[in-house]
Image (cartoon, rainbow, N blue to C red):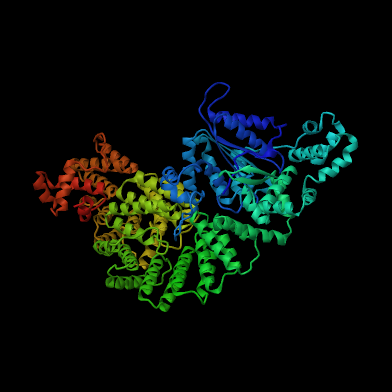
Amino acid sequence: MSHVTEPQEWATQPLLERESEIRAIHRAVDELCGTSENGPTARRGGVLTFAGSGGIGKTTLLGEARRHAGERSCTVLFARGGEQEKQVPFHVMRQLIQPAFAAMTEDERRDVLGTWYSIVAPALGLTAAPEGPTAPDPQGVRDGLDWVVTHLTVRSAPVVLILDDAHWADAESLAWLTAFAARAEELAMLIMLACRPDEIPAGAGALRALMGRQGTRPHELAPLTTTAVARIVRDALGQSADDVFCRECWAITGGNPFEVVELAMKGRDRELKPHQDSIPELRDLASAVKGSGLIDRLEQLGPSIVRLAWAAAVLGTAVPTGIVGSVAALGDAQVADAINKLRSARILTVLTGLRRKEVVEFFHPLVATAVYRSIPPGVRVAMHGMAAQALVDDGQGAAAAARHLLEMHPDGDPWVVQQLRQAARESFSAGAPDAARRYLARALREPPDAEDRAEVLFELGSANLLHDPATTINQLRAALEEPKAEQGLREAITYRLAQALAHTGQLAAAAGLLQEEAKQASSSRTRLRMQAEQFKWNSVRVDEENSPARSRLLAQFAKRLTGRGLAERHILGLRAWDAAMRGEAATTALEYAEQALDGGMSWTDQDFGFEVPSVIAVTLMYCDQPGRAEDLFNTGIVEFEAKGWRGAHLSFVYTLLGYVRYRRGRLAEAEDFVRNGLQIADRVGQGIPAQWYAIGTLIETLLARGNTAEAQRVADTYKLGDGFPAAVVYPDPQAVWGKLLLAQGRIDEAMRHLTAAGRRLDLRGTRNPSWSPWQLDLALAQVTRAPEQARATATEAVARARVFGTSSAIGHALRVSAAATDPAQAAVLLQEAVGHLEQSPAACELAHALVDHGTALHTLGDPHRAAQQLYRGMETASACGADGLARRARSQLVSAGLRPRRLHTFEQDTLTVAESAAAGHAALGLDNTAIAAKTHSDPQAVSELLSAVFTKLGTDRLGLRRALGI
């Protein structure tokens, strides 16, 4: 693509009556450069906007801004929206960025862009879009563009970014610019925009908001007064021009600077006498400056010249003269002659493009618009077809030709379908799915050959999946009904349609589709894959009729599988997750998780999805191996970011990584990760599953930190209490809401919601108190209302925790059970709870148990042991970031007459020499007594050392060998 690097010839007239705008430009550039009337200051960027009708002088004003910025040694990034190019994705961004990379080799570009190369280079036109099924999402590309522009700004400061005719900017570039503009001030970048307010597209609300940023109005350019018009006229026609003649020029043009200059230039060409007697001739001349008069003047130049002007109008801005001549069907000599005559007529000019080629430009966008609209419709369509062919022949590719193919009438042309499909693939790979959808929808109307129709429908449905899943469903159903769809394509359509149904909440329909298609499949591997997908979507259905039966079937399937292929490993992963949810022995869940991971599993496989790797990681977390879970989630983040997937996928993983940190007791880190996940989810859309996951996890984390007020604010912001999603979400939203109510002392409401959540989860067979501790929270709520019932509830939760068998689950359940009994029995239960939790990585839960145990011991009159536990609990709580719990421990110490000592600080992830020695012995199978003998210590000291080891490494005793690399 060529981009103009020299100023327009028509933009050379002096600026009149624009003093305030020029002062604003100079002041903004001065602030950007860190200078003022009072001496050097800190550099300050910002946004400066100009608005006005066509021809009012916006481009001339921005030309002055470019000149002044250049004089101040600023780096200037310039682009102009084009009426014919507004549907070309990243057209504006390429103008802004390509000049900075024009002189670089491919290796230099890769070096500068680093890991962002594969994500942003296709969007910027620096390399061809890669072939393949995966593509960056639009947010990933915008994030990459943020990085590129930030890098350029830091490296080449001060930077002025100028966009003319912003109302014609493509949607992809505008989406980036309007979001990035908020950073202009902090980056010390000056952004200047000019547009016609009346022509801002209906869907470009962000541009309107940017034009009125922070409540300030754009600089609205007013028409010239009679005085300014008189000066222009006299400069062109002589100082003898009388006042009546000059006033008539003003009246005819309305003070529009472009029309005034054009009228004056035409008057000079005709040697018009600037007197009152010439006014009739002046009016005739004025009609030739614009509209039909301009076209009449063009037609008088001859048919070949008209054809060249038409071709230039069809092709758009900055097109090489050779391509324009090809579309106009003119030879080189005819092109040169036509350009000379059009230049003399102030219609066209020739400039030097970025690649040092001569390119054609209209003198003004108003002229280009008038010429384009004058082309007879049939001729215009034909010329768009010729333009598409010429661009493909020139090697510019299907994406460059696509906008012309959109203007053609459907004619069943296989070449058109082929080019549109290729353009869609390139746009999709460049992170512009909207453009891909336009091209594929047009290909479908061509229409394609019967044997290709199902594939086009599949491509269109896939492109619509994340943007408009409801439309995707209709398109994919139509694809599935096509009689000529081959078996492999039919299977791919089925998987994608099931995804679309699931994303729109139609989980039962997704499972039913897979069940029906599996019956028709001729391959056993296909049936197995469809069964895996069916298990996956049924596992998150709230309305599943017989969840236990599905679990039994899944268990039977898993017993027969060896993990030979990805479909088998996905079923094994789902079996691991199901076992954990239902509270089967953690060893069973871990066994299946290990089998599923043996052989690897991609997070970015679009056919299989990322759901199964996610639930395997969460299974490891529930099974007291959060360190391994973090490793898996970190792998997911790396894969997502490498592909440019920075939407809902990344939100899920950040949130779940935060959930792992929450379970480990690293609450400040957990809150940070979850807020990042929620921020991404908010950016993607409201009410999506990723948002529900983040909301619940954030509230749980805030409650653990003792920040109930902030937890309530989050719940209010997202209306958590108004209703709950119709899909399985963890932590369970209704249980989280009940826990929040309990923290606020709203006991009866908390009991109602926790009971309802428990009833719903029990019906599904979800009985693991580690997965959803609703039973434990309900027992705490029942303590003040129904103590006997509280004991029964807690006892059942302990029994379920012992079946699951992890130290964290048992310790948590015992701690809560202690709250429902008398102090003597409570002390016994809490001592056991501490013993279990010391063998787990659940540091925050251990802190709770220690504080509760110390409190119980103090009540029983054992101040020495109470002090030991309270001190340990306070230090552990503080290290976790559980501020509320630390305050409670400190208060208990004070009430016991003990002085809270200064908290110890320690490195959270580095084992001490003593911890390392104890961990090594434990990994070899020694129990605490044997380790104490080896290290000349006592079992309690060993228990405390290993507790720190499990917390730091994120594992329990079972996973210690792997964590230590033994």
Residue 702 in view: no
Task: Please tell me in which quadrant of the rendered image residue 352 appears.
Answer: top right
Q: Residue at x 74, y 59 (%)?
A: 376
Q: Nearer the viewer, residue 217 or 810?
A: 217
**Vertical placement of residue 650 versus 12, above or below:** below
Left or right, residue 591 beside residue 358: left
Q: Nearer the viewer, residue 58 or 347?
A: 347
Task: Report the residue that reaches farthest toward the front.
Answer: 333
**Rendering coords of residue 124 (x, y %):** 51, 48
Q: Position of residue 549 (x, y in %)?
A: 35, 73
Q: Is residue 883 left or right of residue 161?
A: left
Q: Nearer the viewer, residue 464 or 730?
A: 464
Spot the residue most to the right.
277
**Viewer-proximal residue among 582 and 778:** 582
Query: Please, is residue 505 above or below residue 400 in the view?
Result: below
Residue under the point 40% across and 51% down: 642
**Residue 203 at x, y percent in the picture:** 61, 52
Compared to residue 645, the image places residue 42 above or below, namely: above
Q: Is residue 230 left or right of residue 124?
A: right
The count of marks equals 0
Instruction: Name which quarter of the figure residue 752 lies in.
Output: bottom left
- Could you tell me residue 8's position as x and y percent? 66, 40
